[in-house]
Image: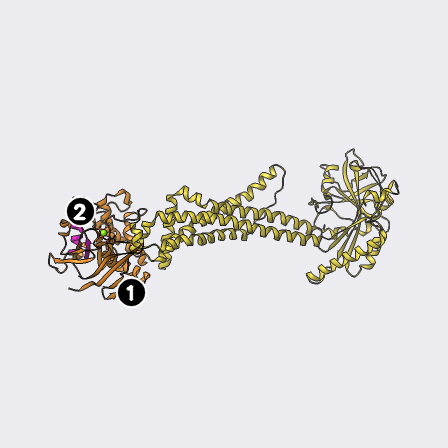
Amino acid sequence: MRVIARVENLTKHYFLEGEVVKALRGVTLSFEEGDFVALMGPSGSGKSTLLNLLGCLDRPTSGRYFLGNQDVSTMTDDQLSEIRSRYIGFIFQSYNLIQQYTVVENIEVPMLYQGKVDASTRRRCIRLAEMVGLGERLNHRPTQLSGGQQQRVAIARALVNDPHVILADEPTGNLDSKTSDEIMELLCTLNEAGKTIIMVTHENDIAAWARRVVRMRDGKVESDVRTAPLTSPGSTLASVMP
Amino acid sequence: MIFLTKIRRTVSMAVRNLWLHKLRSFLSVLGIIIGTAAVISLMAFGEGSMQDALEDIKKQGLTNVIVTSVKPPEEATSQRRSFVANYGLTDDDHRRFVETLKNLVTATLPMRVFPAELRPVTDSRLYNGRVVGTTPRHAIVYKLEHMIAAGRFLTEQDEEPIPRNVCVIGSELAAELFPGEDPINKTIRISGKDRAFVVVGVLKDRMPNTSGAEIEKYNGDMYIPLKACRSLLGEISFIRATGARGAEKVQLSQVVLTVDDSGDTDTVRDRVRGVADIVRTQLSATHPKKDWDIRIPLDRLEEAERTRDRYRILLAFIAGISLLVGGIGIMNIMLATVTERTREIGIRRALGAKRSDITLQFLLEAVVQTTLGGVIGVLVGLSMVFLVPYVASQFNYRVPAAIHNWSIILAFSVAVAVGILFGWYPARRAACLDPIEALRHE
Ligand SMILES: Nc1ncnc2c1ncn2[C@@H]1O[C@H](COP(=O)(O)OP(=O)(O)OP(=O)(O)O)[C@@H](O)[C@H]1O
Ligand SMILES: [Mg+2]
């Protein structure tokens, strides 16, 4: 399988009032296309830090990061924005929708920053909203939706630019177990359709949905276990992905 | 194309955000509204009254030099204690002007003016007006060609060979003495004199002249040939009108010299000054008392123009200050908005927004505010410009106003510029937020 993201000896240090916080102390990992990875570990072990680096929201203190075959670790701020808008989809624990926007408009935001908004992107956004089960609520605002529905909007938004990889930081952290399962089912379907997903979670039963579990401790990889085989994309791809 | 779409999206987004906080947005642009409205209306009223003043001066003829007789201070005459006050310009003065200035001056207009009670011969109606002894050139010097409502102005034939007893009268005098009648060929008598004058012409309404020592209400004037005036009055006129009593011996009340206006402005300007200087020297030499005065409309024009320029500078200063205050209001609210929407900024950055996208978004929000403020300000300013003169006119006040297109464009573009200027810093601050920090913001 093709490797789509690779980090080599990645470190990240934070400088706080003269003190150095070593959030990552040399992480080497590679992620294959179509994989579904769960990042686990105790609080403060550096999971979010790693995910933010993978999402090009931040730059490492040292080490290298290749996304596809591009070296991302030396890029400028504008280039990183470009990478985020084209190749990355984010899902956050607290949904992070824009409050003033409707469901469709929220899904559309990444396209806005790619400079691609027209009638066809609007149609695509509507189809994505329908796919995540919000076809009836296209013009609702985030405050009018439940947590689970908001996270569905976030998932649709993460898909709209057809990213190389979807990064999710505790996507079910704010949801009850039934809604969590629904969200995980959705993510699983996407993965089966070929989407690469890297997800941070604390819970074992959420991690059980993944194909590979990476455990971290003190800024280092503690263990890396494949729990399910990596299969080639199912025939459902066309039917699921707009 | 992409850029335009982005702008359109961002603007509609900005409008929506402003609409979300109607009161707050309104209060934050109030400074801009007041500033713009103040500039528009002050500019209109200022320009209006300046224009009035300039028109007034121009009406007196910019190439004219006006020499008038002035009663000298009392103590100068009281030594002799004569009953008749003898002062002012003489026919000799006039003759000397004509001789020495014949190459510089195209027309000289001697005039004799005195207040009088005027009444129709057939009627007991009465009007306190002014008799002006003058020559046909009066029409040229005072530009009366298009001001004749009926009949004609005085002609050479009214003077030579024997002066005729004819007159041309102002509109108000005509209306007062002959209400509802045609005044032409009617006869007017001057109280205390035994001669009557036949009306040969009536003038249209004229704006009073406010630039001299006293206001001249032309509409109550009765113009008669200067020669007839002299044979009527002799040298002495007795003043009985308006409470004053006494007799005066004034040969000429006023001489207007129209300077040759050929050549460029500077040449004409110097020529006017030169004529004034010659007149001054001549009169100083021949008159022991200062019983004359000289008025140069051109000087007054330059003075008025300087005043106007000073007013404009002052106005620019006021505009600057009020828009500065408005701009600070905008900056304040934008900084608050950026803090309030930090998380939104983080989300947008995570989804691919560049720093420039964020800058554009908040800058446009500021500009949309100040532009709306500018539009409202212009409308408020314009309605003041129409309303204030109207209200004032209800109380018989005249507030002249002149709106220039450029004042609207100026006020408006300054408002937009204020948005860019004062929106820049908050927008940059928004753009430079760290995306991760911003996402963590509550
Ligand atoms: N901006 C920052 N400044 C200073 N220290 C930071 C910063 N961000 C993270 N850290 C530190 O880096 C370490 C790793 O943090 P990180 O958020 O990656 O942990 P995590 O594994 O996601 O934990 P959790 O499961 O609680 O979310 C922590 O010790 C944290 O205090
Ligand atoms: Mg975390």
- Tell me what residue is drawn at x 56 percent, y 44 percent: B385
Q: Establish whether labels 2 and 1 are both on one chain.
A: yes
What tint does the image give chain B?
yellow
- Write down the chain letter for disc 1: A
**Number of dots carrying numbers:** 2
Which quadrant, please, contains the C terminus of chain A?
Answer: bottom left
Residue occupied by mark 1: A74
Q: Is residue A23 magenta?
A: no
Work out whether residue B171 can be spotted.
Answer: yes
| Viewer-nearest residue: B54 or B278 | B278
Q: Is residue A188 magenta?
A: yes
The amino acid type of the residue labelled 2 equals: Ser
Viewed as shown, does residue B436 lie left or right of B58?
left
- Tell me what residue is drawn at x 75 percent, y 55 percent: B258
| Viewer-nearest residue: A134 or B370 | B370
Residue B134 appears at what percent x and percent y?
Answer: 80, 48
Residue occupied by mark 2: A180
Viewed as shown, does residue A16 lie left or right of B123?
left
Q: Is mark 2 within 8 Å of ligand 1?
A: no
The amino acid type of the residue labelled 1 equals: Thr
What tint does the image give chain A?
orange
Residue B295 appears at what percent x and percent y?
Answer: 74, 51
Extent of the magenta region: A183-200
| Viewer-nearest residue: A130 or B83 | B83
